Structures are given as C-alpha cells and as structure tokens.
Amino acid sequence: MTDDSGTESGSPTERREYRMEELARLAGITVRTLRFYRERKLIPPPRREGRIAWYDDQHLARLRTITALLERGHTLNGIAELAEAFDNGRGVGDLLGMEVPTEETPVRLTPEELADHFAGEVTPENLAAALDLGYLGVDGEEIVHISRRLLEVSSALVREGIPLGEVLRTAAEVRTHADALADLFAALVLRHAPEEALHRLRPLARSVVDAELSLALDRRLRKRDNPM
C-alpha cells in the first residue's frame, strides 16, 4: 500500500516507492532533469503500474551519486559509462562467496567514495579491470572492495602519481606470481603435513614472502645506487 505522498506505508523495513515528482524533490533535481537521466539510462527503469511509474530507494541513491560525481568533475558521458560498468559488474555474492576463510577485510563504498579514493581515475576501463581482477563487487548501490589493505595500498600508489590503470595491470602480474608462490608453499606443506595444516601455517608463508620481497627490494636499490 502507498500513502498520498507516494511512499509505501507499513513497517520501516518495507521498500519505499516514489512517484517521479517526489523522487525529483528528494534528489534535489527537477522532473525535467530526472526524465533526461532516465532517457540517458543513467538510472534503471522504474516499476510500472498501469501508467504510473514507481521509483525506489535505489533510484534515489543513484541520483544522489550522479550529483556527487558531477560535483567532482565527472561528465555525464563518463557517468553513463560508469553506470553501465557498475550495473554489469559481478555481485558481491560472487566476490565474497568463498568457502575458505579469508584474513582480508572487505570494505563497502558508495561510488562517490570510490571516486574520492582515486581522484578522477575511476574510469570505465579501470572499473572493468578491477571487476575482472575480483577486487570489486556490487551490492545494490554499494561497491564492495575485497580487501581493505589492497584498497589502501592502491590508493596510496595513485596519490604518489602512479596511474590507476598501471597499478591494476601490475596487480594482475602480481596475482600470477602470488598464485605460483601459494602453490609452492601448499605443495611443501602437503608433502609433509596434513591438508588442514595449511590454515595453521599460512602466517609462515606470509612471513617468508614478506622477507624475501624486502630483501629483493634491497638488492634492487643497491643495484640502482651502484650500477657498476
């Protein structure tokens, strides 16, 4: 049931729905702008009930996101491409639906918060690359990053002036080497211990990789400082 204002009555957990005029007012835009966004497919189609179009909280969240991205300097063409990539991205269930426990902490972000992390570099190409890597998933109007540590490191690299596209391409290469290292350690453990020991001994594998990478960077820096 809906009341005269166009919102559903009932418990607070029920989905709210709005007529076009109320949605535009709540989003702080004109009805004409809302129609324009709908024609440009920046928002999903409304639910139709006869000749009446009903919008819900996901439409409202998308409209507020569009406003925030416009304020950050994104163009409507760019936002349209981002919306398409966002709508076609893998769901959070695919991203986090792992039987093996993870030590990584997922992070929930709005699209504008993601844009703030990477200062103008959240392009459709970079978003698609992050989705392909499995770094990002979508849950309604939220984005979920699979690892707080990877999010913080990648945004720190971008702040140092490294393009996000380069960071993601390097991440794909690192993934290949990380898989090989994991296979090496798993094979070592399974030759001498039961399979359940992998969970218990994974901190040792992490320590070995961290120490070896640190030593490798030392060698790289010495080679740079002493080329002869």
Image: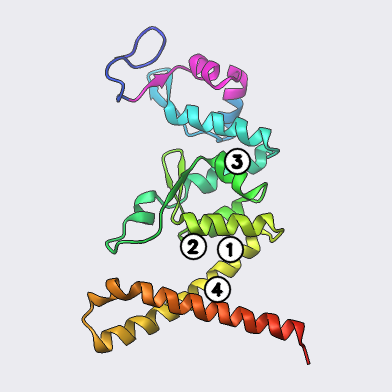
The furthest residue to the right: 228
Assign the C terminus to one quadrant of the image: bottom right
Q: Is residue 81 visible?
A: no
Q: Nearer the viewer, residue 113 or 62?
A: 113
* Callout 2 crowding tier (Cα within 10 Å): few <14, some 14–19, many ≥20: some
Q: Reading the chain from its start, which is encountered first: label 2 or label 3?
A: 3
Q: Reading the chain from its start, which is encountered first: label 4 or label 1?
A: 1
Q: Reading the chain from its start, which is encountered first: label 3 or label 4?
A: 3
Q: Is residue 182 above or below residue 36?
A: below
Residue holding disc 2? 133
Span highlighted in magenta in the image: 15-34
* Foreground label between 1 and 3: 1
Identity, as a three-letter code, of the amino acid under mark 1: Leu
Identity, as a three-letter code, of the amino acid under mark 3: Ala
Q: Which mark is residue 148?
A: none
Q: Is residue 141 above or below residue 216?
A: above
Q: Nearer the viewer, residue 162 or 52?
A: 162
Residue at 31 percent of width and 14 percent of height: 9
Q: Is residue 133 above or below residue 223?
A: above
| Residue 41 covered by magenta stretch | no
Residue holding disc 4? 173
Cα distance, mark 2 to mark 3?
22 Å
Disc 3 element: helix
Instruction: Indicate how the structure is coloured in the image.
Output: rainbow
Badge 2 vs badge 1, beta-carbon distance below 8 Å: yes
Q: Is residue 120 visible?
A: yes
Q: Reading the chain from its start, which is encountered first: label 2 or label 1?
A: 2
* Foreground label between 2 and 3: 2
Q: Reading the chain from its start, which is encountered first: label 1 or label 3?
A: 3
Residue holding disc 1? 168
Assign the N terminus to one quadrant of the image: top left
